[in-house]
Image (cartoon, grey):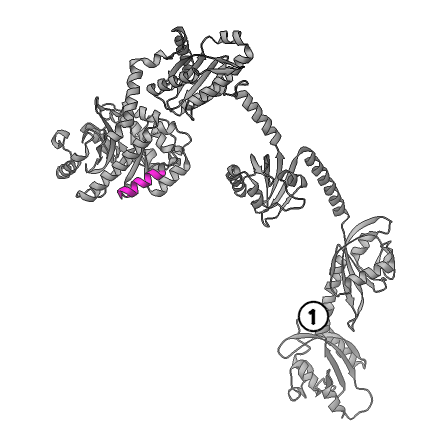
């Protein structure tokens, strides 16, 4: 029965004789050490390796200690590490005792051991938790349901000044002056649901009597039976945080008060969340309800339609890394009122260097804008008539001159106005001046500008008028003023003298005004009630130019414009690789007019735009026809000259794409040539135009290269494909020993920028030989051919393909 009971208990029981041989091994021992009873009976316990052989030196000392103690007749009890037959080591609590008295059992020693691995693990966890609690910077305090303190860590001692011995057992009133029962009920209520409660703020006392602000996290504590026995609180000192919060709140209050007085609103936008905070003054400026949110989308909806693109552009720049944006725009409030705002936005970057928040201040500048508008209007208008004054009229006239839109200036002066003033008084005279201003505005075209320079002197500035139109308009003005003026019940008749000045190539606004003024005085000198044109505009040269301008407007409709084509040659094979289209004007009276005569007129008048469109369409159509119909012409390129005015026109990319689509030509075969000097005169070329042309695949060639002041960065920015060396450099080849130096420099620069090079104006075989030596691949000039009309191109291509390289021009003609 005893043996049976020993087999069933959960502890290992091992019997040993005086030689430490195993005489008994119960089932718990089998489970604990992995050996069956039949395997170990009669074996010395040390031979099993469950005690000896461990790596820990203190283990062997313990084994010797046990043997010595038992040999002397004593008992040994304690903890030691044992080993399973698999080699796994584990801790046990063991009792080893000698058998005393006389018994019939075959053993002298009994060893009882129990696996304490789980207990050791729990103890280690408790030690780590205890160390964590003690090392925490926060106060961790336990209390029972009655509010008595049951635990107190080192953090609590540091925070409140009491030691654990002094605090444990005291009521929570040691820390707080609040009513104990009330506080206990509050704690119980907060943790009664069995969940953590965070964010509880309180003011607790320290041992020295000072008070600190704490933030509490309270959790329930349960007993073994599952019932709540108390609570645990983690207290964090937030005194400094509270102080900073109070200071920040006070500062914000002062800021908001200052903003309200200055009519400045503030906005904060968080990029990651899209959240937006704004001040009350900002809401007032925008006409929002108190507390109404103002996300970016709704703020943009309130923006004036004409200013929304500006706001979008500024926001995009800020999103892309702009540090500061400063701009003005308009909003339209819900009540329909328009307000002007000045916005200043600063970007605050996060750790990744990207925008994290945007801080914006908004100033209502509506009253300032109104005052500025009044001042600006007064500075630019006549106080009596409300018409533009001399400053504004000069500005308008100069604008027309800058746009080469052929302005005309007329000075209109009342004849013998002093008699009218003396006869009916200055008040009535002022009335006549006001009425005359109204008459003049009714007589001129809607796009013309009428102003008053002072006294009885009025000015009319017109756009796009020739001599005949200007005289007709002057007569209409004089006719309008002949009708009587009704003033104070009287009918007053007046006549006017008109001086006319038409723009010349070198005119300025002041010179035109002086001319019109002189012409008006000549009209008065001739008796008044008449009009005169400034003498300088009546010279033969000016008349001829005006006539030429008039005829050029009709040249397209009359079919007087045509294109000649000059071949572009491969200097090694002398094969034709493309053609440059050159514009010609066959005037119906004067015959052939060269481009250097009529192109400047087309540029100044704006006729270059429709003419340039026709040239582009016709050149691409003609070259594509040769590419598709003539043998060996399928790779011909088309070079078309364009002007600066074409290049800056907004619809120019559309014109190019339409011409390419209409002709069916490969865009890569199209080269748009613009002179270097024109590029230098257009410093603000639209990048969108250049990008669109590049996307289409069209090449940009810089003509007359070397005559301007291009820089490498400028050429790269233009995305140019080809440089055309000016003929002045080619002329020096073969005659000047240094003639090829500039061409070599251009070739080196072109190679570094991966640009092609074409030499212009090649006229001699010596120049050709030098170009070959220098490595120029393409050229054009009279050595091969002058510009040819389109009907001669098929024969030219056929003859050139049949001739061997190196023939003189006369041999190819």
Location of residue 81 in the rendering, given as x and y in whole percent from the top left corner: 70, 74
Location of residue 194 in the rendering, given as x and y in whole percent from the top left corner: 75, 66
Location of residue 723 in the rendering, given as x and y in whole percent from the top left corner: 31, 33
Is 809 placed left or right of 339 in the picture? left
Is 147 placed left or right of 733 in the picture? right
Location of residue 298 in the rendering, given as x and y in whole percent from the top left corner: 58, 45
Above or below: residue 79 compared with residue 351: below
Q: Can residue 8 be seen in this view?
A: yes
Label 1 CA crowd tier, 10 Å (few <14, some 14–19, many 20+)? few
Above or below: residue 34 compared with residue 406: below
Number of numbered discs on residues: 1
Above or below: residue 139 compared with residue 85: above
Q: Which of 96 and 758 is in front in this view?
A: 758
Q: In which quarter of the image is residue 93?
A: bottom right
Q: In which quarter of the image is residue 68?
A: bottom right
Q: Is residue 739 visible?
A: no
* Magenta segment, prevailing SS (helix, strand or loop): helix
Q: Does the magenta stretch include residue 669?
A: no
- Per the image, the residue denoted by label 1 is 57
Q: Which residue lies furthest to the front in this view?
A: 489
Q: Which residue lies at the image location 38% right of the left edge and 11% below the top edge?
A: 530
Is 465 placed left or right of 799 in the picture? right
Residue segment shown in magenta: 653-667
Q: Nearer the viewer, residue 238 or 246?
A: 246
Q: Is mark 1 on a helix, strand or loop?
A: helix
Q: In which quarter of the image is the N terminus?
A: bottom right
Q: Quadrant of residue 396?
A: top left
Q: Quadrant of the C terminus?
A: top left
């Amino acid at each position: 029965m005893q043996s049976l009971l020993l087999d069933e208990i959960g502890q290992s029981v091992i019997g040993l004789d005086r030689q430490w041989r195993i005489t008994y091994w119960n089932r718990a021992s089998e489970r604990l050490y992995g050996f069956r009873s039949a395997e170990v009976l009669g074996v010395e316990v040390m031979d099993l390796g469950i005690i000896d052989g461990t790596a820990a030196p203190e283990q062997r000392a313990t084994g010797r200690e046990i043997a010595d103690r038992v040999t002397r007749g004593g008992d040994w009890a304690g903890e030691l590490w044992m080993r399973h037959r698999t080699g796994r080591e584990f801790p046990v609590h063991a009792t080893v005792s000698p058998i005393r008295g006389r018994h019939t059992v075959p053993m002298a020693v009994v060893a009882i051991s129990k696996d304490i691995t789980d207990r050791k693990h729990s103890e280690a966890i408790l030690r780590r938790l205890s160390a964590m609690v003690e090392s925490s910077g926060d106060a961790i305090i336990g209390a029972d349901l009655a509010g008595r303190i049951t635990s107190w860590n080192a953090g609590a001692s540091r925070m409140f000044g009491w030691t654990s011995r002094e605090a444990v057992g005291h009521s929570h009133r040691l820390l707080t002056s609040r009513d104990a029962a009330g506080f206990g009920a509050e704690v119980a209520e907060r943790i009664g649901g069995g969940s953590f409660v965070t964010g509880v703020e309180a003011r607790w006392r320290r041992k020295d009597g000072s008070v600190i602000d704490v933030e509490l996290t309270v959790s329930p504590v349960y007993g073994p039976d599952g019932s709540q026995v108390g609570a645990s609180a983690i207290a964090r000192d937030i005194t400094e945080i509270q102080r900073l919060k109070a200071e920040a709140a006070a500062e914000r209050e002062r800021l908001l008060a200052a903003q309200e007085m200055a009519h400045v609103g503030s906005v904060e936008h968080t990029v990651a969340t899209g959240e937006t905070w704004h001040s009350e003054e900002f809401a007032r400026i925008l006409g929002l309800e108190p507390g109404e949110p103002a996300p970016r989308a709704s703020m943009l909806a309130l923006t004036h339609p004409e200013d929304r693109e500006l706001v979008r552009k500024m926001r995009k720049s800020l999103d892309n890394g702009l540090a500061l944006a400063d701009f003005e725009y308009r909003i339209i409030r819900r009540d329909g009122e328009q307000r002007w705002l000045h916005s200043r936005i600063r970007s605050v970057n996060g750790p990744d260097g990207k925008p994290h928040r945007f801080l914006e201040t908004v100033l209502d500048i509506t009253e300032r804008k109104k005052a500025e508008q009044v001042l600006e209007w007064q500075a630019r208008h006549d106080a009596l008539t409300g018409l533009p004054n001399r400053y504004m009229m000069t500005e308008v006239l100069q604008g027309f001159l800058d746009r080469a839109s052929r302005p005309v200036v007329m000075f209109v002066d009342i004849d013998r106005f002093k008699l009218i003033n003396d006869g009916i008084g200055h008040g009535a005279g002022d009335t006549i001046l006001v009425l005359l201003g109204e008459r003049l505005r009714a007589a001129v075209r809607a796009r013309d500008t009428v102003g008053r320079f002072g006294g009885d002197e009025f000015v009319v500035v017109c756009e796009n008028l020739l001599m005949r139109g200007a005289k007709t308009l002057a007569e209409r003005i004089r006719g309008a003023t002949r009708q009587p003026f009704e003033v104070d019940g009287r009918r007053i008749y007046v006549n006017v003298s008109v001086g006319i000045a038409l723009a010349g190539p070198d005119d300025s606004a002041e010179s035109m005004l002086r001319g019109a003024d002189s012409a008006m005085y000549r009209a008065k000198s001739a008796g008044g009630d008449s009009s005169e044109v400034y003498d300088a505009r009546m010279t033969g040269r000016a008349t001829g130019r005006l006539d030429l301008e008039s005829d050029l407007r009709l040249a397209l409709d009359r079919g007087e414009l045509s294109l000649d084509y000059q071949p572009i040659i491969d200097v090694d094979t002398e094969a034709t690789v493309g053609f440059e289209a050159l514009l010609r004007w066959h005037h119906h009276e004067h015959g052939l007019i060269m481009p250097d005569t009529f192109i400047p007129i087309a540029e100044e008048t704006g006729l270059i735009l429709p003419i340039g469109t026709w040239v582009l369409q016709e050149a691409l159509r003609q070259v594509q026809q040769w590419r598709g119909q003539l043998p060996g012409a399928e790779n011909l390129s088309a070079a078309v000259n364009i002007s600066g005015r074409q290049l800056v026109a907004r619809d120019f990319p559309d014109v190019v794409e339409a011409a390419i689509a209409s002709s069916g030509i490969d865009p890569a075969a199209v080269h748009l040539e613009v002179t270097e000097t024109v590029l230098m005169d257009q410093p603000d070329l639209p990048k969108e135009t250049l990008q669109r042309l590049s996307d289409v695949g069209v090449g940009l060639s810089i003509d007359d290269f070397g005559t301007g002041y291009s820089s490498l960065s400028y050429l790269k920015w233009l995305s140019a494909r080809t440089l055309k060396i000016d003929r002045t450099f080619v002329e020096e080849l073969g005659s000047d020993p240094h003639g090829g130096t500039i061409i070599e420099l251009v070739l080196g620069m072109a190679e570094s920028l991966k640009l092609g090079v074409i030499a212009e104006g090649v006229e001699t075989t010596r120049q050709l030989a030098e170009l070959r030596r220098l490595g120029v691949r393409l050229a054009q000039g009279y050595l091969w051919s002058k510009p040819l009309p389109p009907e001669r191109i098929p024969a030219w291509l056929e003859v050139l393909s049949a001739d061997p390289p190196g023939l003189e021009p006369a041999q190819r003609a």
